[in-house]
Image (cartoon, rainbow, N blue to C red):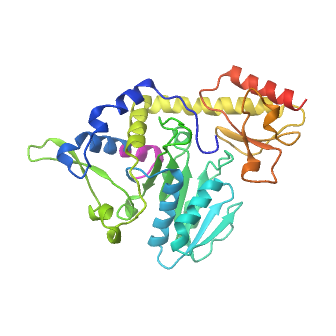
Amino acid sequence: GAGLYDHFIPAAVGALAAHAGFVTAYTPYQSEVSQGTLQSIFEYQSMIAELTGMEVVNAGHYDGAAALAEGVILALKHSGPKNRVLIPAGLHPEYRAVLETYLTAFKPAIETYSAPPSSLPPDLACFVAAYPDFFGVIPDLSGAADAVHAAGALFLVHADPLMLALFKSPGAYGADIVSAEGQCLGNDLNFGGPCLGIMAVSSALMRRIPGRIAGEAKDHDNRRGFVLTLSAREQHIRREKAVSNICSNQGLAMLRACIYLALMGKTGLRDAAEHCWHKAHYAASRIAELKGFEVGPGLFFKEFVVKLPGAYDERLFPDLVPGFPLSRYFPERKQELLICVTEKHSRHDIDALIGALQKAYP
């Protein structure tokens, strides 16, 4: 939980991603020897575009935090003199730290909102929504895009890609930019990496998006092929001409996400999301029944906040890790845990958690 997740990964993902045609592929600028890499980028971008409801997707960023920061920078550059950025209070604390680091050269005015503001400032460049937020809560994005566009700003939604198999896409809500962490799509936890930063934009912004974009083409014999498109090579090799100087193509993580999405398909992805939904809600309902325990309010996906009867102490749980202590980021919240339940957790696992909580706080 808290940004990185333990999801089911088909065994074929690792086997196919280790194929020598991908591992040893030359730089995709030379398309005649990089068709495998270019096609995997093209297929990945096509599936992410469908999942997010957007028109253009790039080949990947270092992680979700970097993708979010690059999206905000895109909005600031697009909006000219406007420099105000509104971010939700529920944004991942580490994402905010990365965003502030990226924006040190831009001198933006970063403000936090707890509830959607009734009126937006005239100097607003970017309005960020977390879908869901760090605490697992899913906000209602209805009408947000209209209000943001009326203020002359861009609407950025940071989403959980697995949740999009179950819920309305950011594109359907009118998002201009979508960022996401793609680790949950076929990538192992591996002690925290590597991750995959997903970034998608509307067609109006496709010339401003950093990173690589693969397109489909035909050769002189009318055979299907793939090439890098919509951006000059200089964007990536000449600092002064680059859209972004800090933009990584996470090739292997992207390839694993592509294979995972192809293997799971629409039905498999939705099944995984539904299991996360039902199992997390089962766990939350069981915990809410315990004396002295409280489950945080709001519609949630996969994660939820639990207030304990007393301060959290890991020594009370010798056999399992019950959740993520919020005191790590919020020192005053010593009695709260962020609990995550995915499709890999069985009823037995959840019941063991309930038993451990009861034993720790009798």
Instruction: Examine the rendered structure and indicate whether residue 6 appears above or below residue 180.
Output: above
Counting from the top left corner in percent of width and height, residue 59 is at 37, 50
102 lies left or right of 334: left
Q: Nearer the viewer, residue 349 or 94?
A: 94
Residue at image point 23% right, 44% down: 34
Residues shaded magenta: 45-55
The image shows residue 275 at horizontal and vertical percentages of 60, 29
Q: Name the quarter where the C terminus is drawn.
A: top right
Q: Above or below — where is 134 with respect to 78? A: above
Majority secondary structure in the magenta region? helix
Q: Position of residue 29 (x, y in %)?
A: 24, 53
Say if the magenta span includes residue 193: no
Is 353 displayed left or right of 28 in the figure?
right
* Residue 283 seen in render: yes
Number of dots carrying numbers: 0
* Residue name at image x 69 percent, y 67 percent: 118
Look at the picture and state if 329 lies above or below 362.
below
Q: In the rendered image, is residue 174 in sight?
A: no
